[in-house]
Image (cartoon, rainbow, N blue to C red):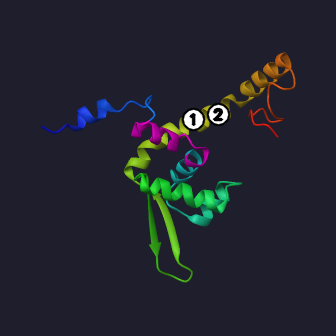
Amino acid sequence: MGTTNTEARAAYDAYLAVCPARHLLDRIGDKWVSLAVNALAEGPQRYSDLARRLVSVSQKMLTQTLRNLERDGLLTRTVTPAVPVRVDYALTPLGESLVPLMRAIKTWAESNMDDVLAARARFDAAAGPSASGSATGTGRSR
């Protein structure tokens, strides 16, 4: 007897390293994915529009991000023959279901950045110069 969708869903445990849900969390937790989904929430966009909107994303990273989102069924890529060729990206219904979560995270980050910066400053002052790892407080060494 095969497993039902309900049984399969119950079997996913993102705390396990081999769980597909964990890999999906890795994907949707990526900053470029979050920003791309938020940008596409406004409607279909061309690659060049997305590249302008996602300031500082490299061409390679944007291409990889869009390809991964298409593979996961979160967006569609539509090629229109023209000179030059027109390529549009749009969220699928599955991708649209992710928008409220991504918007909430983006809004939370923007609304709480002052508090986070203050907490970082307090932490760095209490722990000394080696605590932050870098001038930006990202924890990466220079």
Magenta residues, start to end: 18-33
Residue 83 placement, left or right of 11: right
Q: Position of residue 29 (x, y in %)?
A: 55, 40
Residue 128 placement, left or right of 10: right
Mark 2, residue position: 109
Q: Is residue 76 magenta?
A: no
Decide: is 46 above or below 21: below
Residue 105: mark: 1
Instruction: Please name the amino acid that badge 1 sits on.
Output: Ile
Q: Are marks 2 and 1 in contact (CB under 8 Å)?
A: yes
The kind of secondary structure element at disc 1 is: helix
Q: Nearer the viewer, residue 52 or 134?
A: 134
Question: What residue do we see at 38% from left, 50% from top?
Answer: 93
Instruction: Please name the amino acid that badge 2 sits on.
Output: Ala
The kind of secondary structure element at disc 2 is: helix
Q: Nearer the viewer, residue 86 or 12?
A: 12
State how far apart marks 2 and 1 are (Cα). 6 Å
- In which quadrant is the C terminus drawn? top right
> Quarter-wise, where is residue 64 in the image?
bottom right
Q: Position of residue 74 (x, y in %)?
A: 43, 51
Q: Position of residue 106 (x, y in %)?
A: 60, 38
Q: Nearer the viewer, residue 92 or 30?
A: 30
> Looking at the image, which residue sits at the far bottom?
83
- In which quadrant is the N terminus drawn? top left
Q: Nearer the viewer, residue 118 or 59?
A: 59
Residue 104 placement, left or right of 94: right
> Looking at the image, which residue sits at the far front?
18
Decide: is 16 above or below 28: above
Q: Position of residue 52 (x, y in %)?
A: 67, 60
